[in-house]
Image (cartoon, rainbow, N blue to C red):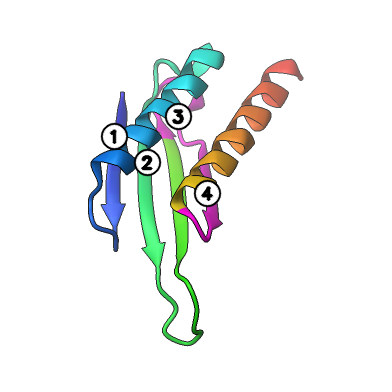
Amino acid sequence: MIQVQFKNLEPSVLARDTAVETLSRVIAQVPETAQSTVQVTLEMKDSNREPGPSLFHVQVIFQGGKKNGMAFQQSAKSLYVALADLTDKILKTLKKERDS
């Protein structure tokens, strides 16, 4: 199961659906994650000290199953770029762990 929450960001059906679809592909490629609940936090971090665009932060935590407690995070100027980069990071880490 994939749970998505928004922090300092208006809830968006598109963002939620994209996160669920993207992480569903991770679960399909790494069967050890299938028993975990995946907690996803989509967040916008505004800097009051620095002018310019906001930074989007994505955090994924696997709860339960073989990957219990495993957490990943990524930030970027675009929510979707952060999500894509994080997905790549998760896949590389989990596949490397499985192969060792």
Quadrant the C terminus occupies: top right
- Sequence-earlier tag: 2 or 3: 3
- Local crowd size for mark 3, using a 10 Å CA cut-off: few (<14), some (14–19), many (≥20): some
- Under mark 1, the amino acid is Gln
Magenta highlight range: 62-78
- Indicate the secondary structure of the residue bearing disc 4: helix
- Indicate the secondary structure of the residue bearing disc 3: helix
Q: In this rendering, which labeled residue sits more in front, label 2 or label 3?
A: 3
Q: In this rendering, which labeled residue sits more in front, label 1 or label 4?
A: 4
x, y (%) of residue 68? 45, 29
Task: Report if the CB atoms under discs 1 and 4 are less than 8 Å apart.
Answer: no
Instruction: Write down the residue under mark 3.
Output: 22
- Indicate the secondary structure of the residue bearing disc 2: strand
Q: What is the CA distance from the residue labelled 1 to the residue labelled 2?
A: 6 Å
- Sequence-earlier tag: 1 or 3: 1
The disc placed on residue 3 is: 1
Task: Report if the CB atoms under discs 2 and 4 are less than 8 Å apart.
Answer: no
- Sequence-earlier tag: 4 or 3: 3
Q: Is residue 100 above or below residue 18?
A: above
- Under mark 3, the amino acid is Thr
Q: Residue at x 55, y 51 (%)?
A: 74
Residue 64 included in the magenta stretch of the image: yes
